[in-house]
Image: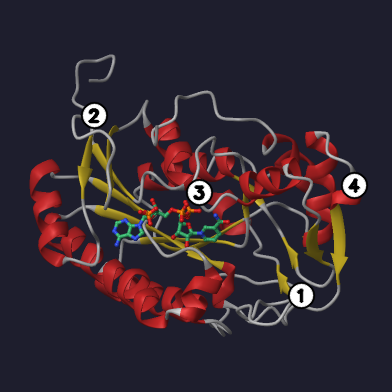
Amino acid sequence: MTAHGIAKPVLLILGARGFLGRFAAAAAESSFRVIRADRDISDPATDIRIDITDPASVSAGFLSVMPSAVLLLAAISDIDRCERDPAVAQRVNLEGAVHVANACATHGARLLFTSTGAVFDGTQPEYREADPPTPLSVYGCTKADAEAAICSALPAGIVVRVSLVLGRSGQAGTNSLVDGLIRRWQAQDVVSASTTEARNPIDAPTLAAWFVELLQNRDASGIFHAGSTGMMTRLEIAQALAQGLGFPESLVRAETTPPPGRAPRGARQFLIPERIAQFCRTPAPTCDEVLKRSLHEPAQGNPRA
Ligand SMILES: NC(=O)c1ccc[n+]([C@@H]2O[C@H](COP(=O)([O-])OP(=O)(O)OC[C@H]3O[C@@H](n4cnc5c(N)ncnc54)[C@H](OP(=O)(O)O)[C@@H]3O)[C@@H](O)[C@H]2O)c1
């Protein structure tokens, strides 16, 4: 209920136990009744089970909660895993997204789909929303195809592309780069970071605030680029994180050529965040602000515990 006794609209978060899910739920709580869904849930009293690859599971989940808005975070987010197993990537990232878009169309729910700068080949100095996708990897292809399917099925749908999200999830088994670095540095493991791949990172709390503002703004539809106002190489990001977290810089090594067997990654993914600034109150942060906000553990308890 809101302070005026009006029932809050229901927001269904799919893939809620992943890295971004926790930040999104915290940001949405004051405006929405948040229902968390995943294919594997820890608390049946508060969460529901939905496997997005199964249309019957998606349909039953929608019928049970009747969402006004849906945040689709569920994905195979590991780019190298997608390259190794393209069938699974296709089934989850494309076909799963289509099942969710169809359910949103049936129920009149707004959809926000999370996509990636990997829809671009990284050869341009910067990217705007109207630039045509040129993916290099299986992950980028599945996301570009899902974007196209969603935009055609749901003209009012929202697609948010990000190149790299930084933040500490405080839980094991998610896609958080910062958590992964901390685990390796605690084990005194030297981490290689690219001198040639550059990104405009965004911190998870700012991204989550943008998700909520876009879902609340009836005029927002189509593709939005989300990121900081500046760009850094992966080496610069790793060095800054090591310093901010109190680890010696000797635990970061410059990597000039990618190791064999990795999925191809574009060199530069600078997603200009101008359009999102026209629709959202939360300003696009600088890289320094992103790095500072990424160092702290979130305050909430651990939903995976
Ligand atoms: N983090 C980044 O830097 C970044 C950058 C660009 C784009 N994105 C996009 O942002 C979204 C969220 O990313 P994230 O970092 O939070 O990823 P994440 O930590 O890997 O979380 C993804 C979640 O989706 C769930 N999931 C996977 N397959 C599913 C299925 N068939 N049905 C239901 N749930 C399923 C996973 O559950 P399991 O743990 O059980 O597999 C996990 O809870 C993804 O679409 C990702 O592609 C993230």
Which residue is disc 4 drawn over? 249
Residue flagged by tag 3: what amino acid is it?
Phe
Does the image show residue 251? yes
Q: CA distance from mark 3 to mark 2?
A: 22 Å
**Res 11 quadrant in image:** top left
Element assignment for label 4:
helix
Badge 4 or badge 2: first in the primary sequence: 2
Label 2 near label 3: C-beta < 8 Å?
A: no
Badge 2: few (under 14), some or many (20 or more) residues near its Cα, within 10 Å? some
Q: Is mark 2 within 8 Å of ligand 1?
A: no
Which residue is disc 3 drawn over? 279
Look at discs 3 and 2 and give the one toward the viewer: 2
Q: CA distance from mark 1 to mark 2?
A: 42 Å
Q: What residue appears at the point 87 percent right and 60 percent down from the top-left corner? A: 253
Residue 166: x and y in percent read: 64, 47
Question: Dividing the image into 4 quarters, which one contains the C terminus?
Answer: top left
Element assignment for label 3:
helix
Which numbered tag is attached to residue 8?
A: 2
Label 2 near label 1: C-beta < 8 Å?
A: no
Badge 1 or badge 4: first in the primary sequence: 1
- Badge count: 4
Residue flagged by tag 1: what amino acid is it?
Pro
**Res 12 quadrant in image:** top left
Q: Quadrant of ligand 1?
A: bottom left
Which residue is disc 1 drawn over? 125
Residue 181: x and y in percent read: 69, 49
Badge 1 or badge 3: first in the primary sequence: 1
Instruction: Specify how the rendered protein is coloured.
Output: secondary structure
